[in-house]
Image (cartoon, helix red, strand yellow):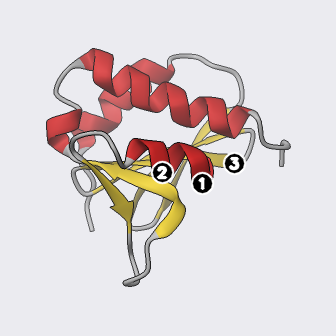
Amino acid sequence: MAYDEFLAERVRRVIGSRCGISEKKMFGGLAFLMHGNMACGIVGEKLMLRLGEDGAAAAMLEPHVGPMDFTGRPIRTMAFVEAGGLERDKDLEGWVGKALDFARALPKK
């Protein structure tokens, strides 16, 4: 599955030159890792977020957000944000920031 290159560029701009960030193709898309821990990524046209169980549960209450589900079983620590929730740069910055904050709190790999 291809991923939205324009969204990938927007995420790169949000991340900027933060220390410890790398990119890796995974999940049929593109993932952004912080110190080896996946923070967020792009699958198709959706932004994938790693937020932890509490963060993902809170995100589900927001418009355009749904569970990340590859196998028929949602992953409780992850969420997808659809394009409608990413139209404004401010919204994208907020979502990516939450994912980076979560990944930053994890032990470095």
Residue furthest out toward the bottom: 72
Provide residue 43's location: percent of width, then percent of height.
33, 57
Disc 1 residue crowd, few under 14, some 14–19, many 20+, Cα 10 Å: some
- On screen, residue 54 versus residue 87, left or right, reads right
> Which of the pair 22/78 is nearer the observer?
78
| Helix, strand or loop under label 1 | helix
Provide residue 102's location: percent of width, then percent of height.
65, 37
> Which of the pair 15/49 is nearer the observer?
49
- Which quarter of the figure is the N terminus placed in? bottom left
Disc 3 residue crowd, few under 14, some 14–19, many 20+, Cα 10 Å: many
Residue wearing tag 3: 37
> Which of the pair 59/11 is nearer the observer?
59
Using the numbered discs, state the Cα–Cα distance from disc 3 to disc 2 in whole angstroms: 20 Å
Q: Which mark is residue 57?
A: 2
Residue wearing tag 1: 53
Provide residue 37's location: percent of width, then percent of height.
69, 48
First-in-chain label (1 vs 3): 3
- On screen, residue 47 versus residue 50, left or right, reads left
| Helix, strand or loop under label 3 | strand
Q: Are marks 1 and 3 in contact (CB under 8 Å)?
A: no
- On screen, residue 44 versus residue 38, left or right, reads left
Residue 31, can we see it? no
Q: Are marks 2 and 1 in contact (CB under 8 Å)?
A: yes
Which amino acid does the dot numbered 1 rest on?
Glu
